[in-house]
C-alpha cells in the first residue's frame, strides 16, 4: 500500500538557514570582541612599582611585598566577598598597616 507519491519530504526553510548564519556570525563577532577586550585590558594595565619609598628615602614596601599581599588576598578567597561593593578587604588582613 505504500507508493512513492505518499512520501512526505521536508521542504527547506530559507528563514531557518538565514537565522543559522546570523547566529554563527553573532557568535564569531562576540568571540572576537571578547578576545580584543581581553588583550586591551592586559596591555592597558598599569605597571607594578618596584618599591614605595617614604619622603626620607626609606623603603616602605617592595614589589615582592605587593605580590605576596595579592597572594594572601587570593589565598583567603577575599575577591569573592563584596564583588559589587568592593568590600572584600573588610574580611581579611589589613595589609596597609606597616609593622615597625
Image: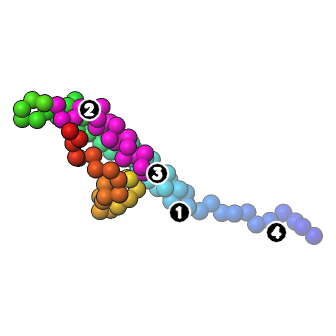
Task: Inspect this view and state whether residue 54 appears.
Answer: yes
Q: Which mark is residue 6?
A: 4
Dot 3 or dot 4: first in sequence order is 4
Q: Is residue 76 magenta?
A: yes
Report the Cα–Cα distance between label 1 and label 2: 58 Å
Q: Nearer the viewer, mark 4 or mark 2?
A: 2
The residue singled out by tag 2 in the image is 63
Nearest to viewer (mark 3 / mark 4): 3
Q: CA distance from mark 3 to mark 1?
A: 18 Å
Residue nearest the observer in this picture, 93 or 82:
93
Q: Which residues are magenta?
A: 59-77
Q: Earlier in the sequence, mark 1 or mark 4?
A: 4
Which residue matches tag 1? 15
Q: Is the magenta region chiefly helix, strand or loop?
A: helix
Q: Is residue 89 left or right of residue 54?
A: right
Q: How is the image coloured?
A: rainbow
Residue 86 coordinates in the image, percent (x, y)? 29, 58
- Looking at the rendering, in which quadrant would you find the N terminus? bottom right
Describe residue 45's horizontal placement relative to residue 16 as left or right: left
Q: Quadrant of residue 91?
A: bottom left
Q: Of label 4 and label 2, which has the lower sequence position?
A: 4
Which residue has dot 3 on it? 27
Amino acid at each position: 500500500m505504500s507508493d512513492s507519491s505518499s512520501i512526505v519530504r521536508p521542504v527547506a526553510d530559507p528563514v531557518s538557514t538565514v537565522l543559522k548564519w546570523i547566529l554563527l556570525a553573532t557568535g564569531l563577532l562576540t568571540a572576537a570582541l571578547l578576545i580584543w577586550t581581553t588583550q586591551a585590558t592586559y596591555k592597558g594595565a598599569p605597571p607594578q612599582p618596584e618599591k614605595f619609598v617614604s619622603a626620607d628615602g626609606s623603603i616602605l614596601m617592595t614589589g615582592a611585598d605587593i605580590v605576596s599581599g595579592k597572594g594572601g588576598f587570593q589565598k583567603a578567597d577575599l575577591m569573592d566577598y563584596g564583588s559589587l561593593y568592593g568590600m572584600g578587604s573588610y574580611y581579611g588582613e589589613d595589609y596597609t598597616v606597616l609593622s615597625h
